[in-house]
Image (cartoon, rainbow, N blue to C red):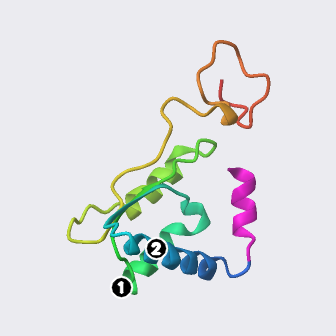
Amino acid sequence: DIVMEMAWNSLEGQFDQSYDGLMVGLEESASYGITTIGDGRLYWKRGWYEVWKQAEKDGNLTARVSLRPWIYPADSMEPQLAFLKKIQSSDTSSLLLVDQVKMYSDGITINGTAKTLAPYLDTYIPDEP
């Protein structure tokens, strides 16, 4: 995730590329009659929250959308919780909702956060078991 974060955020015209891709995806979803979408891993550090908000502002949402921001396991919780509180919305009259989060309560093996029978030999997050 960390490497992809760096690569994604180094793209030129990142917002426009993301927005254009979202428009294509929404159009395709609508063509199949999909009326509800759950973005189950909203990478907000990659600007995706702003992309969705712009689509909402522009009137381009073709479905009710539930954004589920990603909880970054390697980052401290305080700044993440502050951001989540800032963007939280549960206005059911809106097409865009932010009232859930995406996290793995059982851990992720590649991040070294999943419970295992033996200690990890190597981990990206040194402070985790």
Judged from the image, the secondary structure of the residue bearing numbered disc 2 is helix
Q: Is residue 126 above or below residue 101?
A: above
Q: Answer few, some or many: residues within 10 Å of disc 2's Cα (few below 14, many 20 plus, some between 14 and 19).
A: few
Q: Position of residue 65 (x, y in %)?
A: 36, 65
Instruction: Decide whether residue 17 is among the magenta residues.
Output: no
What's the residue at 73%, 22% (across, down)?
Answer: 120
Q: Nearer the viewer, mark 1 or mark 2?
A: 2
Q: Position of residue 24 (x, y in %)?
A: 52, 77
List the single residue furthest toward the bottom. 58
What's the residue at 75%, 63% (across, down)?
Answer: 7
Label 1 sits on residue: 59
Q: Is residue 122 above or below residue 87?
A: above
- The span picked out in magenta is 1-11
- Overall secondary structure of the magenta stretch? helix
What's the residue at 31%, 63% (across, down)?
Answer: 89
List the single residue furthest toward the top. 117
What's the residue at 34%, 66% (across, down)?
Answer: 34
Q: Earlier in the sequence, mark 1 or mark 2?
A: 2
Amino acid type, mark 1: Gly
Label 2 sits on residue: 28
Q: How many marks?
A: 2
Amino acid type, mark 2: Glu
- Quadrant in the picture for the C terminus: top right
Compute the Cα span from label 1 to label 2: 17 Å
Q: Is residue 123 left or right of residue 113?
A: right
Q: Quadrant of residue 63?
A: bottom left
